[in-house]
Image (cartoon, rainbow, N blue to C red):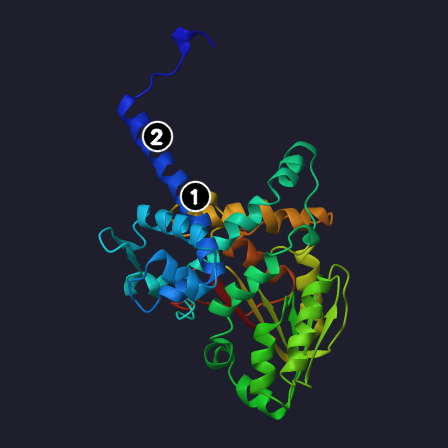
Amino acid sequence: MCHACAPAIDPQQQSDFAERLLGMLNGGMTSLMISIGHRAGLFDAMADGIARTSHELAAEAALNERYVREWLGAMVAARIIERNPVAGTHRLPPEHAACLSRKSPSDNMGVFMQYLAGLGAVEDRVLDCFREGGGVAYEEFPRFHDVMEEDSGQSIVPVIVEKVVPLFEGLHERLTAGIDVLDIGCGRGRALMELASAYPKSRFVGYDLSGPAIERASEFAAERGLGNLRFEVRDLTDWSEPASFDWVTAMDAIHDQARPDKVLRSIREALRSGGAFLMQDIDASSEPCDNAAHPLGPMLYTISCMHCMTVSLAQGGMGLGTAWGVQLAEKMLREAGFEDIRIHRFEHDIQNAYFVMRV
């Protein structure tokens, strides 16, 4: 392109955009340090609001002081932690602790910050996929199930018994009497454990493609003495168990299946007459422009590109992606044979919609 034909640049618009990029850079770096603070238990140690020196904090958290001191510098620069330069102490304000410590069962943003480091670890592999196609397999994400366990611990686990079960009329009574329940893509099965503990007369099973996740889930269930719960490693692409279950759940699991269309049809087939299906999945639009206003829009597409889409493509799948959207989700549910579809949302969970269906 000749210089004369080059588009005119608005200097102010360029400056504003550069400032936005700088904010993104600092935010990304801060996110990485928040992830470190979360995993190291530093925010938990400071959640009481007491001012501490770096030496006191390091001793309390059983960590190396030099690293703690540098981490505190990042937190002070990001205005997350307050520093008294005279006393050399650091304090986490209670308002910040409410968003960053494990004392907040459903509002800990430190959980989500872990995605940045975890997904960055497969950047080279994903870049190869940009050039060659294909995908990155589940087993190449060593900490993803750790993060997902904490994620579900904030979204579905705290509400599965008290708020989700009541979405289905009469389900509580049926679970109390004893029915067969299946969870698709169960991961480490924390939500199923809550249900199995609350309803000892019902029988629960969880399927997941990940062997290590199923192994951990089975160990946890045994430790809790949940004899009415079992887990199995299953590839659900061509799974079939007609009329075998009274309630099927899929919690943030359908969109990253190799063939979500087949899985949804198999779920419909697996339900007995009068059965129910819960699909907890991403509350986004199928149109990217609409997601510009989504509070987690960039995060959803990044997680999709770096995990959900690519693990599906690694299996030769459809690669729907995280932000497949409620519009496409409803369309695929109807094509699978579900007619009565209701969508619920919970105030504590800004990333998911809860699709409720009866057959």
Q: Residue at x 52, y 45 (%)?
A: 302
Q: Please, what secondary structure does the residue beneath circle 2 have?
A: helix
Q: Relative to 225, is 123 above or below? A: above
232 relative position to 24: left or right: right
Residue 154 visible here: yes
Q: Is residue 341 above or below residue 17?
A: below
Spot occupied by residue 286 in the image (x, y as percentages of width and height): 50, 49
Return the mark for residue 100. Answer: none
* Residue 119 percent across, percent down from the top left: 57, 47
Query: Residue 203 appears in which quarter of the rendering?
Result: bottom right
Q: Quadrant of the C terminus?
A: bottom right
Name the secondary structure under disc 1. helix
Q: Quadrant of residue 250?
A: bottom right
Q: Position of residue 321 (x, y in %)?
A: 58, 49
Above-or-below relation of 66 to 213:
above
Type of residue at label 1? Met
User: Relative to the observer, which residue lies in front, 28 or 239?
Assistant: 28
Tell me how many marks there are.
Answer: 2
Q: Which residue is mark 1?
A: 29
Residue type, label 2: Ala
Q: Residue at x 47, y 75 (%)?
A: 158
Specify which label sits upstream in the sequence, 2 or 1. 2
User: Which of the two residues, 82 or 192, is positioned nearer the viewer here?
Assistant: 82
Residue that label 2 marks: 18
Q: Mark 1, residues whose alpha carbon is within 10 Å: few (<14), some, or many (≥20)?
A: some
